[in-house]
């Protein structure tokens, strides 16, 4: 089968940037909009509604009404399952349109949007639908005179605030468990990538989700995002984004109704290669592949490569060589493996970190420059610093771009100390053929996920989230349902038989 001509399809695409509230498209209350610019060429895609307090309030009212009359929460789990399965199937029916919107909006290679983002979002929604009629509640081990039921109930109205790096997947990780358990949703996508969220809501209604259950209000963080997180009638916030904004979320909850806040935040993941690894080539290629996937804009990018001193030169050579396989190109090209960064602001931020690495003597061995300048788009060449030290800014802060810092270490204890000396604790990787060492180091690393002799395994069946300032919740797996449900205890008295 011929690969689609994405550029021709993009030219024929129409956009609708209006809010989605109570089952229909509406302009923002004050008719304000913002420009939605494509990072592929810097051109205007469309105008998108600039939602503010009044729009958030309308969306929360719609979600609350839907929750209170139990049009969704009151459905049997098997009925909710059917709707979520239909929603997932419709996402796949619309996969090419959704993939195109994602790529035009935030610049990732369209084949990744299609084969990763759309596919895994659909799988996530389907997985929670499949799960929900197989989850049982509990009966406590009390005495004969009572029955104590421990049940999970939907929480109510969930505010979802997501970033731009995986717009659909991040939304799906919240929508799946929150909808499956019967909640209503108000989703605020990033102002840098609002288009797929709006289409998802329309598709959900087409699939049979009752109107009002899933609302989307695009807008800026300090306007729509803040209004949602401060709202007195929102029961929980499912947030994915930066650690900086995660702090605001906790603050908003404290200033309003103490709503639950689940933060999935940034990372600076350590990838440790020991001299007893029997897979150095694979270790080198995997770190480069995972670092440059999504142009380095992944919370779990393995951005700190820690290599044992006596194999460092060899591994660095492999890393630099494999990095050259990543070539910035138009993400609508079917062969592109490295698209555009999300916007001009992100390019400037990444180039600022590259300047800092150069100034601190981190030794840029490849990349380090802007790419495809004539296109008007937002491209940065994949970059490797081979002489980084743990104190340098590029080795401490989340860059969120295609910049890898290589740090040398001598002993196992030193590697663990460097890896853990970070405010973040999202993921880590250990490469060693020594099983005891692999387990020892995996246990010592303060991270939500530790990979051994690999990095890219990922599945909806396992929790995803971090220690320390990488967050407090867990997306994915059955554990995510805990976030969107309240635990209720119901005591029933059982009288003794008066005739006995
Ligand atoms: P961001 O924190 O700037 O924005 C995230 C969302 O918060 C956006 O929708 C934004 O509009 C909103 N927001 C911004 N300011 C706000 C405010 N004052 N009040 C309320 N909402 C506000 O993050 P980003 O730049 O969109 O995304 C990148 C970050 O996301 C990185 O730090 C990355 O590590 C993190 N991330 C984490 C995970 C994870 O699962 N742990 C996954 C993906 C991305």
Image (cartoon, rainbow, N blue to C red):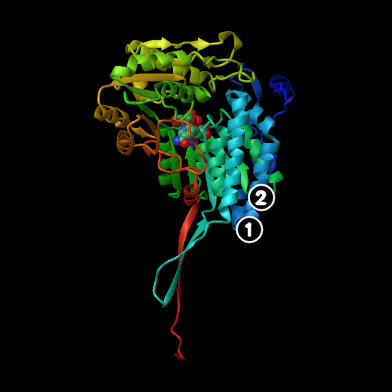
Q: Secondary structure at mark 1?
A: loop
Which dot, 1 or 2, sits closer to the camera?
A: 2
Question: Whole-Å distance between the Cαs marked 1 and 2?
Answer: 10 Å
Examine the rendered structure and indicate whether residue 410 appears above or below residue 172: above
State which quadrant residue 197 falls in: top right
Identify which residue, 33 or 397, lies in the foreground.
397
State whether residue 500 appears in this view: yes
What is the quadrant of residue 360 in the picture?
top left
Q: Position of residue 226 (x, y in %)?
A: 49, 38
Circle 2 packing at 10 Å, graded few (<14), some (14-19), many (20+), is many
Q: Report the disc number at residue 108.
A: none
Q: Where residue 232 appears, x then y in whole percent?
A: 50, 49
Check disc 2 and report the residue beneath it: 83
Q: Is mark 2 within 8 Å of ligand 1?
A: no
- Callout 1 touching callout 2 (CB < 8 Å): yes
Residue at the spot of label 1: 75
Residue drawn at the location 44% of the way across and 23% of the way down: 282
Considering the image in quadrants, where does the N terminus appear? top right
């Amino acid at each position: 089968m011929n690969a689609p001509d994405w550029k021709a399809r993009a030219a024929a695409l129409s956009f609708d940037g209006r809010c989605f509230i109570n089952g229909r498209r509406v302009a923002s209350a004050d008719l304000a909009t913002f420009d939605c610019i494509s990072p592929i060429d810097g051109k205007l895609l469309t105008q998108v509604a600039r939602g503010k307090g009044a729009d958030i309030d309308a969306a929360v009212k719609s979600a609350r009404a839907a929750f209170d009359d139990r049009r969704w929460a009151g459905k049997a789990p098997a009925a909710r399952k059917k709707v979520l399965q239909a929603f997932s199937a419709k996402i796949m029916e619309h996969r090419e349109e959704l993939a195109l919107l994602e790529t035009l909006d935030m610049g990732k290679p369209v084949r990744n949007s299609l084969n990763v983002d759309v596919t895994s979002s659909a799988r996530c929604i389907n997985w929670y639908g499949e799960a929900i009629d197989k989850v049982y509640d509990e009966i406590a081990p009390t005495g004969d005179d009572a029955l104590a039921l421990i049940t999970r109930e939907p929480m109510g109205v969930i505010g979802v605030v997501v970033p731009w790096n995986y717009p659909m997947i991040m939304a799906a990780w919240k929508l799946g468990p929150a909808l499956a358990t019967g909640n209503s949703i108000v989703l605020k996508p990033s102002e840098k990538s609002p288009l797929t969220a709006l289409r998802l809501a329309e598709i959900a209604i087409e699939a049979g989700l009752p109107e009002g259950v899933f609302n989307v209000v695009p807008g800026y963080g300090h306007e729509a995002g803040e209004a949602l997180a401060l709202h007195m009638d929102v029961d929980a916030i499912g947030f994915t984004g930066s650690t900086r904004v995660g702090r605001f979320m906790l603050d908003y909850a404290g200033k309003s109704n103490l709503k639950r806040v689940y933060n999935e935040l940034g990372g600076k993941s350590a990838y440790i290669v020991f001299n007893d690894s029997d897979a150095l080539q694979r270790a080198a290629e995997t770190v480069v592949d995972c670092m440059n996937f999504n142009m380095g804009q992944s919370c779990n990018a393995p951005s700190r490569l820690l290599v044992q001193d006596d194999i460092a030169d060899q591994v660095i050579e492999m890393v630099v060589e494999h990095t050259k396989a990543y070539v910035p190109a138009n993400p609508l090209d079917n062969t592109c493996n490295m698209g555009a960064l999300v916007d001009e602001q992100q390019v400037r931020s990444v180039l600022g970190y590259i300047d800092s690495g150069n100034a601190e003597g981190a030794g840029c061995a490849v990349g380090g420059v802007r790419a495809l300048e004539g296109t008007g788009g937002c491209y940065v060449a994949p970059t490797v610093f081979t002489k980084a030290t743990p104190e340098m800014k590029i080795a401490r802060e989340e860059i969120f771009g295609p910049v890898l810092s290589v740090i040398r270490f001598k002993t196992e204890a030193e590697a663990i100390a460097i890896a853990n000396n970070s405010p973040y604790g999202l993921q880590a990787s250990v490469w060693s053929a020594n099983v005891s060492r692999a387990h020892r180091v995996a246990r010592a690393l303060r991270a939500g996920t530790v990979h051994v002799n690999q990095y890219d395994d990922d599945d909806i069946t396992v929790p995803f989230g971090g220690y320390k300032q990488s967050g407090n919740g867990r997306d994915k797996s059955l554990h995510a349902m805990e976030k969107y449900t309240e635990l209720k205890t119901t005591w029933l008295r059982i009288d003794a038989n008066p005739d006995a």
